[in-house]
Amino acid sequence: MYNKFVYLPLYDLCRITQPKSEISKQTLIIMANKEKLFSDFPSNSTKEWMDKIMIDLKGADYEKKLVWRTNEGFKVKPFYRLEDIQDLKITESLPGEFPYIRGNKKNDNTWYIRQNIQVEKPNEANKKALDLLNKGIDSLGFHIKAKELDAEYIRVLLKDIHCDAIELNFTTCQRHMTVLAQLLIDYFKEKGYDAEKLHGSLNFDPISKMLQKGKDVSPIIDKACELVNLLKDYPHIYCVAVNSVALNNAGAYIYQELGYALAWGNAYLRKLTDAGIDIDLAAKKIKFNFGISSNYFMEIAKFRAARMLWANIVKAYNPSCDCACQMHIHAETSTFNLTLFDSYVNLLRTQTESMSAAIAGVDSLTVTPFDSVYETPNEFSERLARNQQLLLKEEAHFNRIVDAAGGSYYIENLTASIANEAWKLFLKVEEAGGMIQSILSEQVQNDINNSNKVRHEAVAKRKEVLLGTNQYPNFNEITNSKTPLTHACGCGNNHHTEDATFAKLSVERAASEFESLRLQTEHSGKRPKAFMLTIGNLAMRQARAQFSCNFLACAGYEVIDNLGFTSVEEGIDTALKANADIVVLCSSDDEYAEYAIPAFNYLNGKAMFIVAGAPACMDTLKAAGIEHFIHVRCNVLETLKEYNEKLGIK
């Protein structure tokens, strides 16, 4: 079975089954009604564009300055033209048709707005669910404690909810999922619901538990067959999940999340079909739960590529109908890039993420509340989260246009490039024995954890920016006892307390180390004062003072900026009167040779002395005893850790 995909090249994945004659006919109809809006504008060749760019670059290297080298392993050009998509067969497909790159939907782009409820008591959860349904939610996600499951529990939980008018999704202990399925079936029959009108999912995904807990629970996967058979008469209730959102939240790159998700889904597909379940039924019972990062256009391309690649994987099993090749996608905004400090910035992150998913045509979407990093989301944050989606629907009308990104030279190229890299990873996993074997051998975890480590290093050096955390922090923010939350399993069982027997995913958020540093400063009771000694060249001293303020405020230091001083002695005296713990000399590189050593000597060790920049005379300054320099090539995190230690902050 593994070799089924090995020799299938990407070009074949991008081929469209729709006859050329049909495409041409529809294209001609569109062209006949198209106004010639640009006939009055002269066309420019790619060479003319490049010539203009090279003039503007003034000798700078085009590749270094303008070509983006992505973490996904391919390059992105600064501009694309029609000629860049002419050889891409993926642009010939239509919405609602194989390979579904343009989405499963033909008439509109409506998606379900989901909000999750942690069920402590079924009657309270029911009350909250009914309230949410009156506020724009049309999809509910219930996290249920397995030990409390029985028929009465389900009746109370779903009381007065019209199950055939919304989407219902359930998560509980993996070992009790078949019990939950049977209870739901009994309830639906008791209420007389039409199975065709019920939509939802059961989150059965032992592979996710293996990745998150480091325990081999692969034998439980056999229960998938029982689940599928139980729910075979409910065509729109999915019961096998691929929670690649766990990879996203662990810091995976886009191609990694997609490549492993495909192998993940294929592992379940293989288990089901090997057990004798028809491929059409097996494929239609699998749902993918993806995460969404803040890489706006790349995420749009990811979902488009995902549908295309999955459609071709299922096609290799020879289903009787192309509809079995559709990928059903739920998307959740990422937790990896959420921050405790300046937490309202999380709203900006989740808004762009939800826009990516909506434009890409996902089936349902959950927006993570902005405060989920440090507290159980309250009514206010949950309201904002659902309103973020309602704005996209009711005001931006994202639900009306199918595949708005289709035909974009840039996004079509991104789609093909991401598909190519994800497919390579998928084949690598299949050749290694499949997803389960790759987890047991720790290949998957090591790969994702390495990405997590690399991304943390990028955040430490500000190569990856977290607004409000490692760049442009709120200078005066105090946490008021806010601390990062750790999330536990919500199923009510204690299997998660067992010791791991192999590597598991690291789920440290990108901001976690900066947050620990700033909390260390705050909890120490000593907030160091950093004084900007601005002198000399006006433009340079202002720029470096601003840079230094942002740099040092990331550790929670109090920063004191100044308009400028006529002498270093004046500046030092003013700093000492302000009880400064740190004095930062802010000037131009040329002037540091004049100002730095006199300022350092005049300060005479009464405060830490820092030079803002990396001047050519740095070696001379170091020889004079000046140790500290801050500049764009610094590891901000490690530098601030060093300063905290020197200042006695522990």
Image (spheres, rainbow, N blue to C red):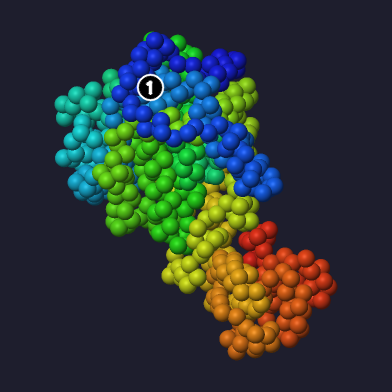
- Could you tell me which residue is drawn at 41 percent across and 18 percent down? 98
**In the rendered image of this protein, does residue 275 appear above or below residue 74?**
above
Q: Residue at x 60, y 42 (%)?
A: 52
The foreground one among 20 and 470 is 20
405, 147: nearer the viewer: 405
Q: Is residue 467 above or below residue 584?
A: above
In the picture, measured across the screen, residue 335 lies left or right of residue 387, that is right
Q: Which residue is drawn at 60% across and 26% down?
A: 424
The relative height of residue 350 versus residue 415 in the rendered view (above or below) is below
Residue placed under numbered mark 1 in the picture: 94
Q: Can residue 275 be seen from the camera position used here?
A: no
Query: x and y percent of residue 501 in the render?
Result: 60, 39
Task: Please tell me in which quadrant of the rendered image residue 374 appears.
Answer: bottom left
> Is 171 positioned to the left or the right of 554 in the image?
left
Residue 408 location (% of width, % of height): 45, 32
Q: Give percent across and percent down for residue 565.
A: 62, 83
- Look at the image and tell me in which quarter the C terminus lies: bottom right
Residue 529 vertical position relative to residue 427 in the rendered view, above or below: below
Q: Is residue 10 left or right of residue 628?
A: left
